[in-house]
Image (cartoon, rainbow, N blue to C red):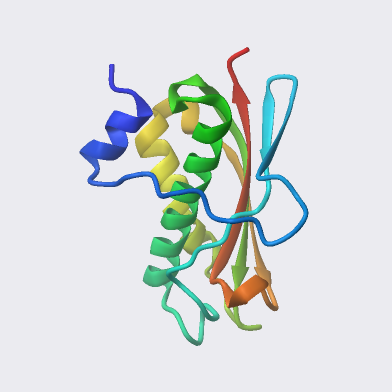
Amino acid sequence: MSTPEQKLKELGLELPALRPAWGDYVRCVRTGNLLFTAGQGVDEYHGKLGRDLTVEEGYLAAQQVMLNLFSVVKAEIGELSKVKQFVKILGMVNSTEDFIEHPQVMNGASDLINKVFGERGRHGRSSVGMAQLPNNTAIEIEIIVEIED
């Protein structure tokens, strides 16, 4: 059985370096067997969905944010195979007032999770539009994962 890291390699993807924090907070907090991440943005995509970026670009941005989050999780627990279950993801999409395709953008994150983790990747999800996000990032995502003790 392939590890999540091997799955990423098979998909032609690699984990990026950890991004610096923009304030006085930690990248994630572990309580019991749950790991709560701080929101992660993306350095490659900036602007509003519905004006500056297409849904397809938003999908790629969500995928990149998820790679950033995988790096955070791996740094905390050592290897991604220790993820027992993705519980919930919250996607905040920097979008115009009339943009309504937030779920299609967030599919970039969900599709990647499910490809890499299979059944362990099945998760609850919320996708919401935001008037603005830090540094004009296109998307910010936070996750809750259950990890092995």
- Give the image quarter of residue 118: top left
Q: Position of residue 140 (x, y in %)?
A: 60, 60
Q: Nearer the viewer, residue 68 or 19?
A: 19
Whether 57 is drawn above or below 97: the answer is: above
Furthest residue to the bottom? 51
Count of labels shown? 0
Report the side of 122 relative to 3 (left or right): right
Give the left or right position of residue 46, taking residue 147 as reference.
left
Residue 135 pos. (x, y %): 61, 75
Looking at the image, residue 103 sits to the left or right of residue 88; the answer is: left
Looking at the picture, does residue 29 appear above or below residue 106? above
Q: Position of residue 36 (x, y in %)?
A: 69, 37
Q: Determine the residue positioned at 68% across, 48% down.
A: 38
- Which quadrant of the figure contains the N terminus? top left
Observer-nearest residue: 63 or 134?
134
Instruction: Give the residue displayed 59% in from the left and 22% down from the top.
Output: 147
Which of the 4 image quarters holds residue 45?
A: bottom left
Question: Where does the image place residue 10, in percent across and percent down from the top left?
Answer: 21, 37
Figure check: 134 above or below 103: below
Quarter occupied by the C terminus: top right
Residue sitting at x 68%, y 77%? 132
Q: Indicate whether 57 appears above or below 6.
A: below
